[in-house]
Image (cartoon, rainbow, N blue to C red):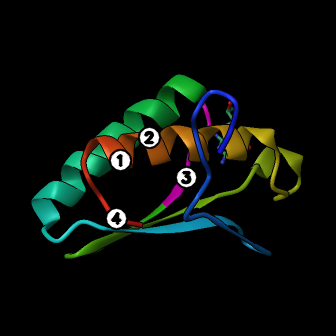
Amino acid sequence: MMGDGSSTAGWTATPGGLVARFRTRTMVRGLEFVTRVVAAAEAANHHPDIDFRYGSVVLTLITHDAGDEITELDHRLAREISTIASGLDLLS
Ligand SMILES: C[C@H](O)[C@H](O)[C@H]1CNC2=NC(N)=NC(=O)C2=N1
C-alpha cells in the first residue's frame, strides 16, 4: 500500500511489462472499465496494451520511450487503473 492509499496489488512485473487481469463478468462492464482506463491513459499520455474479452480485461504497461522497460510512468498508471477497478468493484 502506498502512502496515498493507492496500491499496485494485482499487478505482476514480467519481461513484457506490468500485467494485471481484471474479471469484469460482462463485456458491458468491461467496456465501462476500458473507457475509464483510456481516459486515464490519455490524461497521462501513457497507454496500456489492452486485451479486452467477454469476462475479463488484461492490461499490460511498459514504457516504449525507455526501450520497453518498466518505469515509474507504468507504476503510476497502474495505481490509477487499480483505483478505477476498485471503483467499479472489479476483482483482479
Ligand atoms: C508521442 C507520445 O507522447 C509517446 O509516444 C507516448 C505515448 N504513450 C506511451 N505509452 C507507453 N506505454 N509508452 C510510451 O513510451 C508512450 N509514449
Q: Which mark, residue 91? A: 4
Give the Cα distance between marks 3 and 4: 18 Å
**Callouts 3 and 4 close, C-beta under 8 Å:** no
Kindly identify which residue carries mark 2: 83
Kindly identify which residue carries mark 3: 48
Tell me which numbered mark, 3 or 2, is placed earlier along the sequence.
3
Residue positioned 60% across, 67% down in the render: 19
Q: Main secondary structure of the magenta part?
A: loop
Kindly identify which residue carries mark 1: 86
Q: Is residue 38 above or below residue 58?
A: above
> Left or right: 89 with respect to 6?
left
Taking the image in four quarters, ligand 1 sits in the one at top right
46, 75: nearer the viewer: 75
Residue positioned 73% across, 38% down in the render: 73
Amino acid at the residue labelled 1: Ser
Tell me which numbered mark, 1 or 4, is placed earlier along the sequence.
1
Element type where label 4 sits in the image: loop
Please tell me whether mark 3 or mark 4 is closer to you in this view.
4
How many badges with numbers are in the image? 4
53, 21: nearer the viewer: 21
Q: Quadrant of the C terminus?
A: bottom left
**Callouts 1 and 2 close, C-beta under 8 Å:** yes
Which residues make up the magenta segment? 45-49
**Callouts 4 and 2 close, C-beta under 8 Å:** no
Element type where label 1 sits in the image: helix
Please tell me whether mark 3 or mark 2 is closer to you in this view.
2
